[in-house]
Image (cartoon, grey):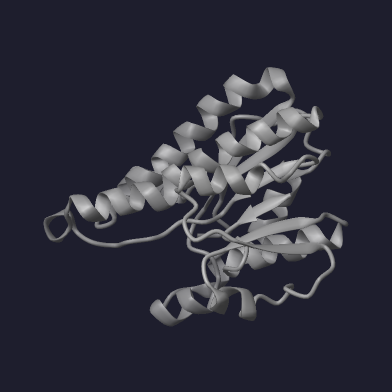
Amino acid sequence: MVVTGGTGALGTAVVGALLKVGAFCHVPYRNESEAKRFPYADSKNVSLVAVRDLADEAAVTACYDGYNRLWASIHIAGGFAQSPIGKSDKALLLDQLTTNLVSAYVCSRAAIAAFARAGTGGRIVNVAARQALEPRLGANATAYSAAKAGVAALTIALGQEVAKDGILVNAVAPSIMDTPANRASMPKADFDAWPTTEEVAAVIVFLASPDNTVIRGAVVPVYGKA
């Protein structure tokens, strides 16, 4: 399996869960500091792959071209920007579209080619956000919300397109997750209401597994009690 964003908080939880069920994980990373702090870097079932920009079609295609037994591609990599539109600009919008939507699109395209080589079908799981399903929550983060809405639309449209090939495409839409960074930025929030990264990871792992035989084109809310 490929797990983009695998060195981040949610990505680390996903890789850990996948390793427990015996998966082999290819984890792209942007810089050496990410690779060094990744807790599963020494696992025999993890391959760290340097890919500086997951929206770079040529780099992503070259990466996936090496995978002839790929079963799933999980796209966690992305970015968040909060800014009222009056203090925003086109550059911020394009950055959010690139890091969230374009990266998922390019990786999905490369994964589908790899699935075709394997001839066994496959699974794609994207990460949208609660704002993609409830856009009013995206006030003051309109660029991010628009990008994640694009990820949701990509998931539904692509899920219809490739179902005939045995490829099931889904997404999760988390609310704010319980991570150290989120706790630090919102110290007065009710942390117990947030889903943990492990809880979100469990949904992702199921959608990416052979046990998922019928779910496609879904954008699954993972809100916890929030």
Q: Residue at x 74, y 24 (%)?
A: 166
| Residue 220 visible to an observer of this rendering | no
Residue at position x 51%, y 25% in the image = 157
Residue 185 found in image quarter: bottom left
Q: Position of residue 167 (x, y in %)?
A: 70, 29
- Most foreground residue, 119 or 146: 119
Q: Is residue 5 left or right of residue 216?
A: left
Residue 131, position as x, y percentages in the image: 40, 48
Query: Eyeballing the image, is 128 above or below 9?
Result: above
Relative to residue 210, is residue 186 drawn left or right?
left
- Whether residue 32 is visible here, answered yes or no, is yes
As drawn, 180 above or below 29: below
Place of residue 7 in the rendered image (x, y in percent of width and height, measured from the top left): 61, 68
In the rendering, at what x and y percent does residue 208 appear?
Answer: 73, 43
Q: Nearer the viewer, residue 186 or 96?
A: 96
| Outermost residue to the top | 164
In the image, what residue occupies the spot 31% across and 46% down?
Answer: 136
Residue 207 located left or right of residue 127: right
Number of marks in picture:
0
Quarter holding residue 84: bottom left
Residue at position x 52%, y 56% from top?
A: 77
Determine the residue located farthest toward the left in the rendered image. Answer: 86
